[in-house]
Amino acid sequence: MNKIPEFIPGPPGTGKTHVWLKKKYTEFLKQYNWDRIVVLSHTNTAALEIIKAVKNLPGLENIPDTKLEDQICTIHSYFRGEYLPLQKYEKKEHEKFCNENIAMKHWNKGSWDKHPLYAFDSHAHGKEMTYDEYWMVCNANAYYPYNKYHLKNLKEKYDKFRDLHKKLSFQDMIDNFLKYAEVPKDIDVLIVDEAQDCSKPQIKALQKAATNAKKFIFIGDADQTIHEYAGSDPEFFYKLASTPESKANELTEGLRCGETINAICKNIIAPVWKKWGVNAERVWTPVKGVVGNSYWIPSIEQSCKASEVLINKILNTNETFLFTYRGNPTHKRINEFLQNNGIDYKLVSNDKPHVSRKDFRCFKTWDNFLNDKVSKKQIMEYWPLVGKLVKVHGKGSVDKLKPLIDKEYNIQEFIDMGFILPEAKQYKNFSEVVIKKDLIEKIPFIKKVLSNNMDIGKMPRVEHDTIHKVKGLTYDNVIVDLSIYRPENDRYEPMRLAYVAYSRGKVDCWTIGTSNLGMSLANIQNHRREILKL
């Protein structure tokens, strides 16, 4: 019989991870050895955040992070590392497979690891379906231009390739644990964070792993189940949430969302609560003393009062901002808005600013090099970018500067030393000497950011990405675009997505619309009705 976990539910921002988990972990350390307490998450980032939160607790002060990472890690890492000797693919092996199969080799819509095969394989596995079964219920457009037969053929080759190299896919890690691994004897406590994101096979694997555990706990929020396409099971978690034990343990005190965002989220998700008949009178308090405002932007391509308020707040406060949206097609819209307005930003999922801090420094300090002196370190940052002016260029050109004495230089000294051409002095604007093509394309944006006096010494305060990729994150303000919609088997899925999106924010929120989706967030009931229309 499958072991049923204790479920600790809580709406967004109620401290499930950073408050409740830390507190319970402290209690468990008094009862059990630290190496018999296992905490699992879905991403490496989340696992590292948990380690950071608990590493200084009494009893863990002298435990190296490398040891803690064996006990606090991702679900896949735990099952692979603890019980299965085989390793997952390395990048070079994936690339080899892609190059050997023409349908993979000519995939030009993303990197080697974003081919539709991998997504389709993962999603079918998560739902415990064959390729034929999953094709009948999936959104086939998501895997365009491939059809079921393309993907089945590639799957056969993919399986043979893995067998040849004795490597595991992520799906193999779960399946092999369920099929071959013995029930672990070294777990007293098993805790799963953001458990609502677990697929059906993952839930079964966790239940098996917890067979001998004295404590088996899921932490999460059924209303944030937004990976149903990949096999997460809202029904399973709503049933868990409806048990008397879960209701008694539910976290209700809001630590993130102010009154406005809290009210919007409640109204969006209310029909979902009604459907499941649980938490119909759910308590979720806003943060005391924080009200906040909501704004409607009819179209992000056209200026309006609400967008002007947004831009002004970005440029004149130190608050953080998240732009989030349903699908990648919106990515371009947001990029263009930020670039046109000279707003420094980065994508959440790659954690890299649109323009590096180094490139910003080069543009900002070139005038110093012409008229005063700059450090050797700064000059070495210029060097890969100004090749058409330098006598020392090509491969290893930067290395040729390293023997210089570590002091400050001006451009005339560099001319005298024979490193740079005399005509370099005539170029008053750094944009005139840049040779990197991708940087040349960013020059108008760089000039706008610098003219806005944004702090380019720090990482950007403005970030954007899809709703699925920002779940679990917190920002002062959130800007939500729901205009890209794809059909779902579950009509409540868009509501859960909107609920997750808005609840990333603390204070103010903006909604970006399209011409066919016009409503005022001043009227929350209208907002709910528009969400229902979706």
Image (spheres, grey):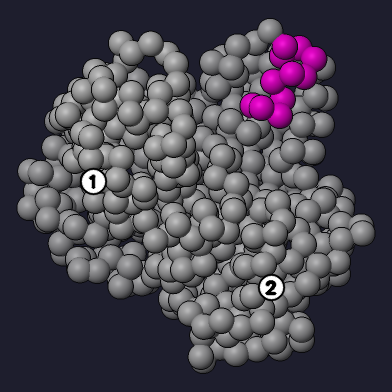
Q: Is residue 435 magenta?
A: no
Kindly identify which residue carries mark 2: 309
Give the image location of residue 236, x and y in percent: 61, 57
Q: Which mark sits nearer the N-terminus, 1 or 2? A: 2
- Separation of residues labelled 1 and 2 (CA atoms): 37 Å
Majority secondary structure of the magenta segment? Answer: loop
Q: Residues within 10 Å of mark 2 (few under 14, many from 20)?
A: few
From this viewpoint, is residue 441 visible?
yes
Kindly identify which residue carries mark 1: 435
Give the residue furthest to the top. Answer: 62
Q: Which residues are magenta?
A: 51-61
Is 40 situated above or below 323?
Answer: above
Q: Residues within 10 Å of mark 1 (few under 14, many from 20)?
A: some
Where disc 1 sits, the SS reads loop
Residue type (three-letter) at the residue carrying disc 2: Val
The residue shown at (52%, 78%) is: 300
Is 125 situated above or below 90?
Answer: below
Give the image location of residue 360, x and y in percent: 45, 44
